[in-house]
Amino acid sequence: MDIKTYVTEKASRAKTAARKLAVLSSATKNAALLKMADELAAQTATLLSANTKDLDEARRRGLSTAMIDRLTLNPKRIGEMADGLRDVAALPDPVGEVMKMVRRPNGMQVGRVRVPIGVIGIVYESRPNVTADAASLCLKAGNAVVLRGGSEAVQSNAAIVQILSTVGADSGLPEGCIAFLDNPDRQAVMEMLKLDALIDLIIPRGGEALMKTVTEHSRIPVIKHDKGLCHTYVDEGADLSMARAICFNAKVQRPGTCNAMETLLVHEGIAPAFLPGMIRAFQEAGVEVRGCSKTRAIVAGINEAKEKDWTTEYLDLILSVRVVKSIDEAMEHIARYGSQHSEAIVTRDYGRARRFLNEVDACAVFVNASTRLNDGYQFGLGAEIGISTSRIHARGPMGLEELTTTKYIVLGEGQLRE
Amino acid sequence: MDIKTYVTEKASRAKTAARKLAVLSSATKNAALLKMADELAAQTATLLSANTKDLDEARRRGLSTAMIDRLTLNPKRIGEMADGLRDVAALPDPVGEVMKMVRRPNGMQVGRVRVPIGVIGIVYESRPNVTADAASLCLKAGNAVVLRGGSEAVQSNAAIVQILSTVGADSGLPEGCIAFLDNPDRQAVMEMLKLDALIDLIIPRGGEALMKTVTEHSRIPVIKHDKGLCHTYVDEGADLSMARAICFNAKVQRPGTCNAMETLLVHEGIAPAFLPGMIRAFQEAGVEVRGCSKTRAIVAGINEAKEKDWTTEYLDLILSVRVVKSIDEAMEHIARYGSQHSEAIVTRDYGRARRFLNEVDACAVFVNASTRLNDGYQFGLGAEIGISTSRIHARGPMGLEELTTTKYIVLGEGQLRE
């Protein structure tokens, strides 16, 4: 079978399944998710054996230690995957919620009800747990999925999907509702992106090259989970110990994430009091600090931050630091270099807090809190499929509600258009 | 200047303008809109003179009467355009509304606030009033626009934009916030669709060829305003006179619109009582009726509906009629042939009303009301930029709220990620 036919058939079955899934009861979906969780845990040995094949191949191909770590399954990670499914089962079903219903002057009632989007294509990279996470969130919101994981995880992903599909079929889910593209050919992704009659939304999760490919070639709407070049601005008069704790947390707690701080902006009025202790704390935690000339005039012996530093998402224990004259200069820097992801101000000043909230354009803007809190669980969504950096449909942490759309319903008794 | 540079410069200035527009007060935006309305009316002569050039060219090129009618401006239409701007000025500003704010267990407050999308590209066809309508709605919601109208209306559109821009500059709107691509070359659209770093959303309004071009070539998210192949299903036991009024309204009141009925589905139990009178009423109104074999067995002398009739959006006084065995057959027909636009059931049965509402997939589903009511004004949105047939971000009538996105705001007092 050629690749186009192979992808089209899977997507086509997913579309048929989506119509049935859309009207399935919450009880059926939840029971299936709980059984899937039990079965993933029960089949730990099967999953580890599939994962070993991926790991052997990864070592043979000389993948980095970090890549191999992301790819690795172990009983603890499989247990967490199963618990993730149980968490999703416990969340309220968004489908069927009537968000708003009004009575119009002619007496008809007009409401908006949440309905599934339809078929969602997920294109992702190495972590096999994304397979179970993404499938469970899409299913709970009544959507069929077409999954396309990284080629390096193909055995692990196939084993996970095999378990989910078997349980799904036994639990009354429509056949084909979890489609998995096990063909590692890149052409499979390209064919998938053309199927705008069968797939309703593409969610890419991964690096810049993947984002670019998907954006350029997709005829299907895309919601990106793109990079985060995040800043924290320490305002004049900020609480110094709060500022230190927030900046430290934003950089060090987990530097490889999209909501970690990459550049620290400090008002010149507070920089001499704040920076020496702050930079020492970073250095003690193994952070390489690169500073602007004003920073280096205050703290000796640190490297120079170059233009490239302001545009780099390090995802590592590296931090660029810039001293600014005012909140305007800070916001100007953020507008120029930021990726509209997570931006924070530490301040005691009401007016500047308000300006920062109003004027900074990002999916999440923080006053006196760590950018690391930009997360579906932290924000109370229960679970997230990622953090959308798109401006359309979903922006910021994307939970079950963002995996639905709406339809208008109109209840009348013979109303006509005049 | 080559076309790529020309389009990029306009879009780039729109992006700069968008940042300023996003934080403009409602008072400034409303004052500008009211002044624009006055100025459009005051410059009626200028607009008519520009429109005459388009009309002369249209006649020279032999455009159809319908096309020429759509293209024509007259004092009444210019007055309506001005009133449209006044209506938009009177609507509440969606920007800045905090939709929801919760306190999380760690004490931080997390809210979602409506913010402008940024730069919106509108690609549309002949009607010059779209220029003023679309620009005013986008501006009110804090967005810059890049307008690309049909080449046949280029003089009229340029004159309208000239007035809006001059008033805008005098009223404190940022320079370049209403960009207009006056180059009629199709390449200008193609270049526009590549500018995903400058334009945040594309809204195409027009025929199938335009939809296809935009979907295939855009790297920017697209919200389609596509065709409507709409059905009304008259259920067994329906109120006959209500069914007649609804079906007549849905077909005849304005047949050239996307929410007009194209196919009538009738339960076989009610068809003998319903169809003869209904079809006579349609025929008296000049509607050509094409029926399935069962329809033709009930009413003699009407043409046969062929497969192609079920898939055709007539946009005209033509109607296809099919007699069905059950609501299931009706919904199956709708799922197969419908365009998920406006679908109605006429019924007295509670259970079947509920099934139709739950199971039919469309941007608006009606019980006992005319599909013609699928409209932003009728639904209470105040004004609409069109009816979205996309499933993402906006579905159905698209008003000011749908021209915004959201950002999360977080108010803390030192919260960290554990």
Image: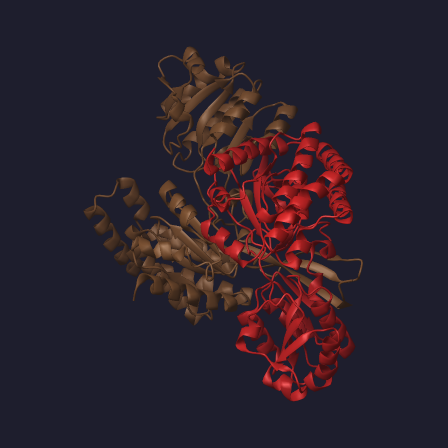
Chain colours: A brown, B red
Q: Is residue A31 visible?
A: yes
Near-viewer residue (B242 or A360):
B242
Near-viewer residue (B298 or B69):
B69
- Residue that sits furthest to the top in the current view: A297
Rendered position, A305 above or below A374: above
Rendered position, A60 above or below A38: above
The answer to whether residue A129 is left or right of residue B380 is left
Q: Residue at x 36, y 54 (%)?
A: A189
The x, y position of residue A104, in whole percent, is 77, 58
The x, y position of residue A33, in whole percent, is 46, 62
The answer to whether residue B347 is left or right of residue A315 is right
Q: In which quarter of the image is the C terminus of chain A?
A: bottom right
Q: Count of labels shown?
A: 0
The answer to whether residue A391 is left or right of residue A411 is left
Rendered position, A280 above or below B378: above
User: Which quadrant of the structure image shows residue B24?
Assistant: top right
Near-viewer residue (B359 or B175):
B175
Q: Can residue B97 be seen in this view?
A: no
Q: Residue at x 58, y 18 (%)?
A: A237
The x, y position of residue A288, in whole percent, is 35, 24
- Residue that sits furthest to the left in the current view: A60
Rendered position, A139 above or below B95: below
The answer to whether residue A339 is left or right of residue B243 is left
The x, y position of residue A395, in whole percent, is 54, 44
